[in-house]
Image: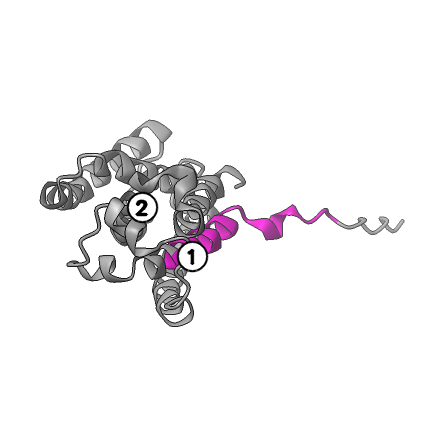
Amino acid sequence: MLLGGLPDLATAATCLLCWWQPRLLGTDWIKPMLLTVLVEFLVIHSGVFMAVFGNAPKTRLFRSLAHLGLAGFYGLFVWLIARDYEAPWLYALFGWLFFSKLLVCWSAQPLHHPSLREQLIDWPMAVASYLLSLVLGGLLFEAQRGGLDYRLIREAGLSGKPMFEQAPWTLLASGALYFTAMGLYRMRLWRWRRPGPQPAASN
């Protein structure tokens, strides 16, 4: 599904800009994108439940209601984070990340359809990509500060007390890697191959 990967690719591009060209978007974008990478963990955690319980109803309306119920449950965790960081915009951020999942799920059919299998595969793919991106971001890009000098970090309101604020460029690098990988995967690029010529029917 082509549209299923666009939100992830847009988020990856934003992480990359905040890392290498933070002035282009403004320093106010840096901390939200750091929290975007962290909140994505909740979206990943919800993936398997969305695939199974969210697709159990047979009509798209009731599937949508099931998805919204799951979004409300995980929204409680987002509320706790938003309260601690005094960041009410996290609700919109969570909705954006959840939207990329809904684009995939809304195209699903009832439980026996192969699209459910694809969504169940999407979940371990997301888990593996997320963990691998965090590892690669810390190992490969620890010295690659990009455009994030100390003055910009202070302007962005990063205190350095939470662990993810101590080297914010590594988390932004991880986010760029993860969202790029998932965006390309969710676009199902292997389906874009043109079908080959059909063999002629024998008489």
Q: Nearer the viewer, mark 1 or mark 2?
A: 1
Residue 97 within the magenta-colored segment of the rendering: no
Looking at this rendering, what residue extends furthest in the front direction? 151
Residue behind mark 2:
30
Q: Residues within 10 Å of mark 2 (few under 14, many from 20)?
A: many
Residue behind mark 1:
146
Q: Residue at x 35, y 61 (%)?
A: 170
Residue 62: image x %, image y %? 29, 30
Looking at this rendering, what residue extends furthest in the top direction? 61
Residue 174 within the magenta-colored segment of the rendering: yes
State the CA–CA distance, disc 1 to disc 2. Answer: 13 Å
Q: Could one spot residue 110 in this view of the protein?
A: no
Give SS at disc 1: loop
Marks 1 and 2: CB-CB under 8 Å?
Answer: no
Residue 167: image x %, image y %? 29, 62
Mark earlier in primary sequence (1, 2): 2
